[in-house]
Amino acid sequence: MEHLSFSLRPIAVVRSPRNDLRDDFWGDVVAEVEVSPDLPEDSLDGLTDFSHAEIIFVFDRVAPDSVTTSARHPRNNTAWPKLVCSPRAPKGGRIA
């Protein structure tokens, strides 16, 4: 398979008061999406007509030396199938 690469230009940043990078206990955390000032204003037209917005994000705080591409059981639970993208794996889950 040919290796493809691409780059992304963020159009927003998600901010919350939480600094702890643990995967758990995010239910009560309120986060805000801060849209880039150079994003054209009309690009958000109609957004309020929807009940949800899909936010695609990058785990940018995962240390590069902890990135793994091996399949792992989520949360090390062997009752669950191994996954390549398992963010709660021991070494983090960002895909290289």
Image (tube, grey):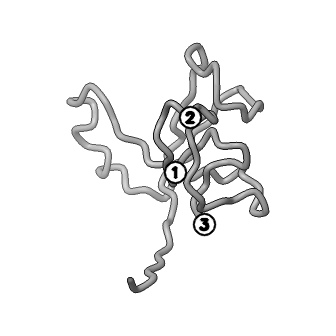
Q: Tell me which residue sits at (65%, 31%) in the image.
A: 23
Q: Tell me which residue sits at (60%, 22%) in the image.
A: 26
Which residue is denoted by mark 1 in the rendering? 85
In the foreground, 16 or 3: 3
Q: Specify the label residue 96 is tagged with.
A: 3
- In the image, residue 12 sits, relative to residue 10, either above or below, namely above
Q: Position of residue 34 (x, y in %)?
A: 54, 41
Q: Position of residue 44 (x, y in %)?
A: 31, 45
Q: Tell me which residue sits at (55%, 45%) in the image.
A: 86
- Circle nearer the N terminus (3, 2): 2
- Circle nearer the N terminus (3, 1): 1
* Residue type, mark 1 in image: Cys
Q: Identify the element where label 2 is drawn.
A: loop
Q: Residues within 10 Å of mark 1 (few under 14, many from 20)?
A: some
Whether the residues at callouts 1 and 2 have beta carbons within 8 Å, the answer is: no
Q: Position of residue 19 (x, y in %)?
A: 77, 32
The quadrant of the rendering that contains the N terminus is: bottom left
* Residue type, mark 3 in image: Ala
Which residue is denoted by mark 2 in the rendering? 78
Q: Position of residue 56 (x, y in %)?
A: 44, 48
* Residue type, mark 2 in image: Thr
- Circle nearer the N terminus (1, 2): 2
